[in-house]
Amino acid sequence: MHDVAIVGAGPVGATLALALAGNDLDVVAIDGRPPGVTLRQDRSLALSWGSRLTLERLGVWTELESVAGAVTPIVEIDVSQAGGFGAATLTAALQSLPALGYVVSYVALQRALDAALARAEVPVRFGTSASRVRGTPAHAEVILADQGEPLRARLAVVADGTGTAVDGIVRERHDYGQVALVGEVFLDPPRRGVAYERFTPDGPVALLPERDHHGLVWTMTPEIAEAMLALPERAFLDGLARHFGTRVTGFAHAVGRRAFPLVLERARPVVTARAAVIGNAAQQLHPVAGQGFNLGLRDAWELAQKILGAPRDAIGGGTMLADYAARRRLDRGAGIAFTHGLVRIFGNDEPLARWSRGFALALLDVVPPAKRAFTRAMLHGMH
Ligand SMILES: Cc1cc2nc3c(=O)[nH]c(=O)nc-3n(C[C@H](O)[C@H](O)[C@H](O)COP(=O)(O)OP(=O)(O)OC[C@H]3O[C@@H](n4cnc5c(N)ncnc54)[C@H](O)[C@@H]3O)c2cc1C
């Protein structure tokens, strides 16, 4: 029997496997990806400063940073709202840090993690998918889709991005009735390292710096998205420029426009008999605050600490899993509430809401402790 079986060696599952490596534990990971293949070629991840520190500790950051174009530092975040006063500028200098966060290529991160797992000699069975995970009082059983011999472990950790295969865990879903229109936008002149977050009556819109361009995440109704996707490039850019008002100008070029539905999904509970769900399997958030991946990474790190701190025969036991769930409750709840609240408060066009938003943003900009506290929450999460 293994000590830990990890289902899904994506960014979150691989982080957990690496954090457990070299500790005399029998850890195995499986992933449906064929060997050497990375998913999500077009996705970028928003990484907080705290996530960088985690990747540094695991020996992944230096290699990732050395890949040309894989990492773009965010040195300034400009937050504003349409049709109301108040704006805030958060800077890395205020925190005495080289960056507030980073935009990282999913593919480059996955490659760096896969290479680190190979170096640490963590067994990863690629091309192997789980169809079901079930717990018994004594062990967890991971049933494989290819009908191969099931894996048995003291603890099964599901980091498959959906969490659907686990017995005893349900997924709550809130559909925002909106979609995110994403794509790559080129500004002239390019504003390297500056992220823009703009709240409009139709929903939030963000521009995240990536190499020589910005990644766009624009929230809107499916009907408006359909129309925006069909527009010629110039008309699309003009519509975007109107949304940003005077905060951003020089919209020169847009490529790769596409849209996906926005939902909040969360697993309840995140632990069950001999199993835990982490990362996107535990929560999938609206991308507005860039919190999703960072929460997932903290799930992996905290679970690793609980496993490493437990005697071998307590791994996967009720006490260890309850401790882990309790430890994650505040940070996870706050991340979900913060993201969900941002969407609701800033998606509301009541004049009073607009005024209080402006007041909050103005306050954030001029009151250094408030600004530092907000920035710290964005950097490290809410423990
Ligand atoms: C549509 C969409 C867009 C997003 N855009 C952004 C964004 O712009 N910025 C951002 O920061 N975050 C974004 N996110 C969130 C971000 O992608 C996740 O936070 C991150 O990918 C979570 O990593 P993960 O390892 O939990 O899951 P995943 O990245 O989904 O990895 C899951 C891994 O598990 C493997 N797997 C799946 N099923 C099985 C199985 N049954 N058996 C074995 N292996 C399996 C997969 O092959 C994969 O390697 C987005 C999410 C979605 C859904």
Image (cartoon, helix red, strand yellow):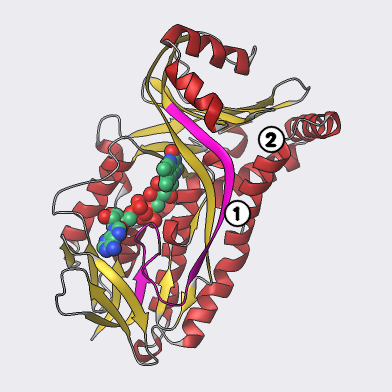
The image position of residue 20, as x and y in percent, is: 32, 70
Any magenta on residue 238? no
Instruction: Say above or below: 332 vs 155.
Output: above
Pick the residue in front: 94 or 262. Answer: 262
The image position of residue 268, as x and y in percent, is: 54, 69
The image position of residue 70, as x and y in percent, is: 30, 34
Any magenta on residue 173? yes
| Badge 1 element | helix
Q: In which quadrant is the N terminus drawn?
A: bottom left
- Whether residue 364 appears in this view of the structure is yes
Please give the residue where the numbered disc 1 appears in the rendered image: 336
The picture quadrant where one finds residue 45 is top left
| Badge 2 element | loop
Badge 1 vs badge 2, beta-carbon distance below 8 Å = no
Look at label 1 and name its amino acid. Answer: Ile
User: Badge 1, how many Cα within 10 Å: few under 14, some, many 20+?
Assistant: many
Closer to the chain start, of discs 1 and 2, is: 1
Residue in the image at 42% along x and 61% along y: 281
Q: Write the start and end of the magenta stretch as one range.
A: 156-182
Residue in the image at 43% along x and 64% along y: 278
Instruction: Say above or below: 77 vs 290.
Output: above
Please give the residue where the numbered disc 2 appears in the rendered image: 347
Residue in the image at 51% along x and 26% along y: 225
Pick the residue in front: 308 or 214. Answer: 214
